[in-house]
Image (cartoon, grey):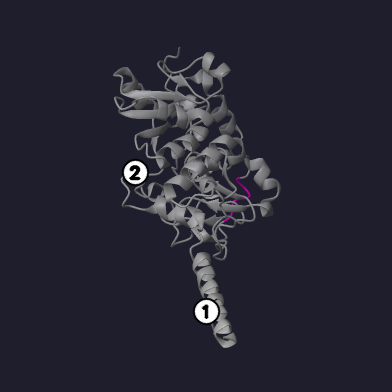
Amino acid sequence: MQKFRIYFLSILFTAFLVTGCEKEEETVIEAEVLVEYLESTDSPLMKDYVNTDMPSIIGAADVKTLNTVGGAYIIDIRSAEDFGNGAIPNAHNVALGDILTHVESNDLTSYEKIIVVCYSGQSASFATAILRLMGYDNAFSMKWGMCSWHADYSGGWTNAVAAGNTYATQFTSDATAKGEEGSLPVLSTGFTTGQDILEARVETVLSEGYTPAKISNTEVFANLNNYYIVNYWSEAHYTDPGHIPGATQYTPKESIKLDVDLKTLPTDKPVVVYCYTGQTSSFMAAYLRILGYDAKSLAYGANGMIYDIMVSAGLTTYSEAQIMGYDVE
């Protein structure tokens, strides 16, 4: 009898260990579930947006044309005060944190495009990325923001360009290798499906706002070692016109994938992403913050650091020619 009891307890203990291991194996790594969901090309909503269609930007002229025929639903995320001092006709003033709720609670199916507008096109790009990731594949950010609509609102880009050569002598062609592959950020939404995790993370990111998702070139250059700097343009341009010292090159629509270089981004320090204008990098910052990275878009991009070099190289730059002089109300 004693032997039988020992044998029985041994079986129970073994079963407990096996069950415990099975439960441990079933633990959900939320960030991985989320990335796999967002990179899925099977979903009619996702289509691996970050590596296919991003960024989704539309020029002021096209916005005006669409607005004239009632094809654009325009959301202006500037402050209520600035909105009241002049806005695109028919635009709706909505705070960034409320943009998803606003879109979800209004029937916008009759509009060809949802246009998000801000001061410079950067925070609007951040908001548009979130709408896109939530399935609104007709959402677009207006290029250059209100700075391109009328000269009265062009101060942001005008000032950025005026100081746009501050760091021209500091750019380098010396390459910096990507970080070692590590783990994804730890998420703790408590959900197990990609859609549920996405919704929870979007709610968090929207509640945080755009402020923690942006950084000035002055802050970055004050201590370059504080940041993992992502140069988000082609390898050719990484060499010429060069890049911020210590920045690492990631190719648009290619590098930021789970099976490529996503895991080389660190989870223990801020990730600063920069592009030509600060608009594409704002799209990317939104995506990375949803994944749990402390990602920041470098304001005004290379336009705010090496402007004349950008002009000479024929790269995307802001100028007075971008100001359309359209009516406001």
Three-letter amino acid code at disc 1? Ile
User: Does the stretch in magenta take in 171?
Assistant: yes
Is disc 2 placed on a helix, strand or loop? loop
Figure quadrant of the C terminus: top left
Relative vertical location of residue 98 with respect to residue 289 in this rendering, above or below: above
Residue 315 x, y percent position in the rendering: 45, 43
Relative vertical location of residue 148 with respect to residue 220 in this rendering, above or below: above
> Which dot, 1 or 2, sits closer to the camera?
1
Q: Which residues are magenta?
A: 168-172
Extreme residue in the bottom direction: 3
Residue that badge 2 annotates: 45
Residue 175 x, y percent position in the rendering: 55, 61
Residue 229 x, y percent position in the rendering: 59, 52
Three-letter amino acid code at disc 2? Leu
Residue that badge 1 annotates: 11
Left or right of 102? Residue 179 is: right
Q: Residue drawn 42% across and 42% down?
A: 133
Is disc 1 placed on a helix, strand or loop? helix
Residue 313 x, y percent position in the rendering: 46, 45
Viewer-side residue, 97 vs 127: 97
Viewer-side residue, 195 vs 40: 195
The label on residue 21 is: none
Q: Quote the CA–CA distance across marks 1 and 2.
A: 49 Å
